[in-house]
């Protein structure tokens, strides 16, 4: 696994060069890039350009006119993710997918260390996640298999990111075992359970003259 240390040092702006034109993505922290990586959808990067309507309109016009090929744009967006992640898109996607699969451990450890998703770059987040995942795989042989999984780009890159994600999860579960299924699944949505009642304290007996 090749890693670019520069991706972990600061949040960088990125220039997308497509169709002979240059479009800029502003410097954004891991919190903004993470949903793109988890979804495995490079096109979500285009949302970062909404602050500059001229660029967004130009991309649409270039695609509609045929001046810009969709494959060229997709590759430019993947290149942008790899620049921010400091590693291949496949490797970053696998790390993000496994991190979500093991979030009670990974998220808890990062929170305990005070990791700031709203400040730190995406490369630094993936740097921190990598050893946490390895430490959660008990056997040395299985850790080596996970390292091979990071390099196995044939596992992803299909037309369906949902199938890619499931393939990664299945492979990881053979190494670390399936994640616990007990309890309630965290979704980020408001709870639909009844609000717990607060027990009121009994009033002290009233004293004469008060």
Image (cartoon, rainbow, N blue to C red):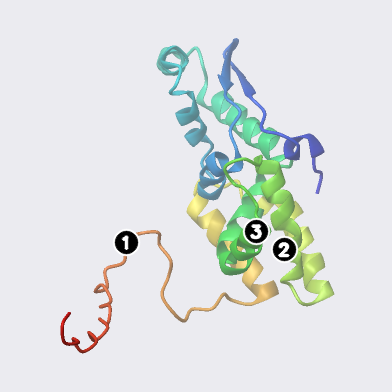
Q: Position of residue 151 (x, y in %)?
A: 76, 52
Figure disc tally: 3
Q: Secondary structure at mark 2?
A: helix
**Distance of mark 3 from mark 1, alpha carbons?**
24 Å
Do callouts 2 and 3 mark residues in contact (Cβ within 8 Å)?
Answer: yes
| Dot in front, 2 or 1 | 1
Q: Which residue is at the front of the view, 191 or 142? A: 191
Residue on which the image places disc 3: 110
**Distance of mark 2 from mark 3, alpha carbons?**
9 Å
Looking at the rendered structure, which numbered label has been put on residue 112?
none
Query: Seen in the image, is 171 located left or right of residue 142?
Result: left
| Dot in front, 2 or 3 | 3
Q: Position of residue 132 (x, y in %)?
A: 72, 63
Query: Seen in the image, is 75 located left or right of residue 146?
Result: left
**Distance of mark 2 from mark 1, alpha carbons?**
29 Å
Residue 118 visible to the viewer = yes
Do callouts 2 and 1 mark residues in contact (Cβ within 8 Å)?
Answer: no
Q: Which residue is at the front of the view, 167 or 4? A: 4
Residue on which the image places disc 2: 132
Query: Seen in the image, is 110 located left or right of residue 48?
Result: right
- Residue at far front of view: 209
Residue 58: image quadrant is top left
Residue 20: image quadrant is top right
Residue 123 sits above or below residue 67 on the image = below
Residue 113 sits above or below residue 41 on the image = below
Q: Earlier in the sequence, mark 2 or mark 1?
A: 2
């Amino acid at each position: 696994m090749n890693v670019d240390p520069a991706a972990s040092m600061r949040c960088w702006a990125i220039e997308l060069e497509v169709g002979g034109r240059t479009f800029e993505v502003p410097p954004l922290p891991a919190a903004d890039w993470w949903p793109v990586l988890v979804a495995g959808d490079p096109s979500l990067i285009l949302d970062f350009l909404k602050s500059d309507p001229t660029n967004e309109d130009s991309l649409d016009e270039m695609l509609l006119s045929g001046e810009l090929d969709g494959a060229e744009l997709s590759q430019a967006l993947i290149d942008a993710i790899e620049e921010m992640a400091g590693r291949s898109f496949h490797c970053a996607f696998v790390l993000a997918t496994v991190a979500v699969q093991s979030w009670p451990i990974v998220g808890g450890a990062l929170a305990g260390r005070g990791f700031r998703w709203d400040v730190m770059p995406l490369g630094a987040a993936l740097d921190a996640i990598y050893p946490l995942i390895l430490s959660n795989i008990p056997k040395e042989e299985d850790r080596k298999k996970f390292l091979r999984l990071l390099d196995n780009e044939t596992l992803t890159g299909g037309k369906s990111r949902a199938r890619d994600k499931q393939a990664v999860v299945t492979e990881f579960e053979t190494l670390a075992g399936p994640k616990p299924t007990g309890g309630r699944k965290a979704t980020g949505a408001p709870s639909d359970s009844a609000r717990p009642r607060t027990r009121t304290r009994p009033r002290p007996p009233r004293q004469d003259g008060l």
